[in-house]
Image (cartoon, helix red, strand yellow):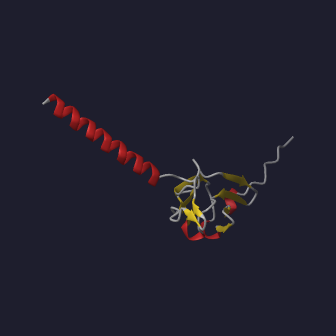
Amino acid sequence: MAHELLRRRHETLGELLDKMDASLVRSQTFGTDMKSDVVEKYDCFEVTADIPGADKSDVKVDYEADTLHIAATRHEIKDHSDKDGNILQSERSFGSVGRSYYLPNVDREGITAKYKNGVLHVVLPKTEATKTSGIKIED
C-alpha cells in the first residue's frame, strides 16, 4: 500500500513538472520587460517603447483612467530549419508583453501612435490646464 502511494505521488509530481515545463515555454516573453523612454514636454508626453519582432497588427495601445496601456504579442516561430538543415540554437522568443504608464490630464482625442522597425512612438498631448509655464516669484 505505501509503495503504491509513493509511486502515485512520484507520477503526479512528474506530470506536474512536465506541465510546468510546457507552460513556461508557451508563456515565454521577448525580454523580461518592455524597454521604454517616457519624456514630459511642455505640451505633451512622449513614450517610446522597443517591441522588436512584433507585427504592427499585434501591438495594442489604449488610454483610460489616466493610464497609457501598451501590449504586444510576438508569435511562435514555426519553422526551425533553414535550406541547409536544422538550426542548432534558437534564442528568439515569443509571447506577450505589456506596460502601463500613469500619465494624467491627457487630451485622449489627440493621442497619436506610430510603429516602425520594432519601435513604438506614442505622443500624448496634455490638456490646456496641465501645460506648465512656471510661476513667477515676486520680490
* Residue closer to the observer: 123 or 131: 123
Residue found 57% across the figure and 47% down from its top: 32
| Residue located farthest toward the right when viewing the structure as drawn | 139
Q: Is residue 114 left or right of residue 27?
A: right
Q: Where residue 110 appears, x then y in whole percent?
A: 65, 69
The vertical placement of 84 against 4, above or below, is: below
Q: Where residue 59 appears, x then y in whole percent?
A: 57, 65
User: Where does the N terminus fall, quadrant-wise?
Assistant: top left
Answer yes or no: is residue 61 visible.
no
Q: Quadrant of residue 20?
A: top left
Q: Where residue 24 appears, x then y in whole percent?
A: 44, 48
| Residue located farthest toward the left when viewing the structure as drawn | 1
Q: Is residue 88 left or right of residue 44?
A: left
Labels in figure, total: 0
Answer yes or no: is residue 91 visible.
yes
Q: Is residue 54 left or right of residue 14?
A: right
User: Where does the C terminus fall, quadrant-wise?
Assistant: top right
| Residue located farthest toward the front when viewing the structure as drawn | 84
Q: Quadrant of residue 113?
A: bottom right
Q: Quadrant of residue 115?
A: bottom right
Residue found 30% across the figure and 38% down from its top: 13
Residue found 82% across the figure and 47% down from its top: 136
Q: Where residue 10 appears, x then y in whole percent?
A: 27, 36
* Residue closer to the observer: 95 or 105: 95
The vertical placement of 16 against 59, above or below, is: above
